[in-house]
Amino acid sequence: MVSSYNCKTKYPIVLIHGTGFKDRKHINYWGRIPQALKNDGATVFYGYQDAWGTVENNAVIIRDRITEILDQYGCEKVNLIAHSKGGMESRYAISTLGMADKIASLTTIATPHKGSKTIDVLHNKLNPVFKFLAFFVNKFFMILGDREPDFYTVTRQFSTPYTKEFNKKNPDSELVYYQSYAAVMKNSFSDITMVIPHSVVGFIEGENDGLVTPESAAWTNFKGIIKSSTNRGISHADEVDLRRKRFTGKTEVEGVTDIVDVYIKIVSDLKDMGY
């Protein structure tokens, strides 16, 4: 068990969510994770970017949010923990928007740094369908509060051509400590919400968490693949505690039985490194 206040880092934590969701007061994207970190001494904030905003637009929101936090709370830097596409947005804020000196560390969890071959195939074969869906998704998420939803562009930003170019333009900064994690499901029925995407990605690319492969998620200082010791595995949704409960078995990364403990370990390690 992690000792009390072992998550009291030098710099506050900012949680950066992934695609399709927003940071809401009563339906927390991160489940039990934020409160667990706070209970262990961490100061936690949220990115508040759009659910279907492009990498570029959401990065501007993240930049402004970090600036607001620094101004209001008098801290010099922040630690970013980003899930899925939030990791790309964070990297853009660091490298393109000039926030490197304001960010102590960036931890990415299941971020598609190297893109998705599945998206390549689907957009190639079903491009008109994506354009059709975009109209309805954008309208719906504007009602829910998105400022500039762009479903079509966002889905294309998961393609391998986009991420290849993105990585060239957004290299790691020497001022920031980077680390990354991945996860995988044992089979497509491990998480009922991920049956179809896991099956499709598995057929085209191999093992994955329901959306992202370890190969794509592995970035600087790759810490490993989070795997459950049971037949369930850990899904893209599990990574942010969608089920709001512990796993039934231990995981191979750090030997924990709860995704909350993974985050506590991440933050306590950041504290030990002086961040």
Image: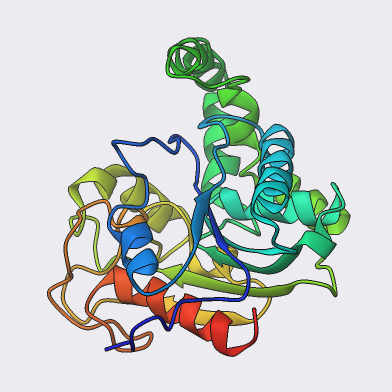
Q: Is residue 153 left or right of residue 201?
A: right
* Quadrant of the image containing the N terminus: bottom left
Image position, residue 233 (x, y; %): 25, 69
* Residue 26 visible in the picture: yes
Can the viewer see residue 226 in this picture? no
Q: Position of residue 153 (x, y in %)?
A: 65, 28
131 displayed left or right of 88? left
Is residue 172 positioned above or below 160 on the image? Answer: below
Image quadrant occupied by the C terminus: bottom right
Position of 180 relative to 82 (above/below): below
Name above or below for residue 157 compared with residue 247.
above
Q: Position of residue 184 (x, y in %)?
A: 36, 68
The percent position of residue 144, horizontal first and vertical second, equals 42, 18
Q: Residue at x 50, y 39 (%)?
A: 19
Q: Which of the 4 image quadrants contains residue 22?
A: top left
For residue 76, side relative to residue 127 (left or right)? right
- Residue at point 33%, 87% (across, down): 2
- In the displayed structure, 177 sits above or below 188; it is below
Taking depth in this image into account, of 211 and 246 the one nearest to the observer is: 246
- Residue at left 16%, top 80%? 249
Along the horizontal axis of the image, is 248 left or right of 31?
left
Residue at left 30%, top 69%?
Answer: 259
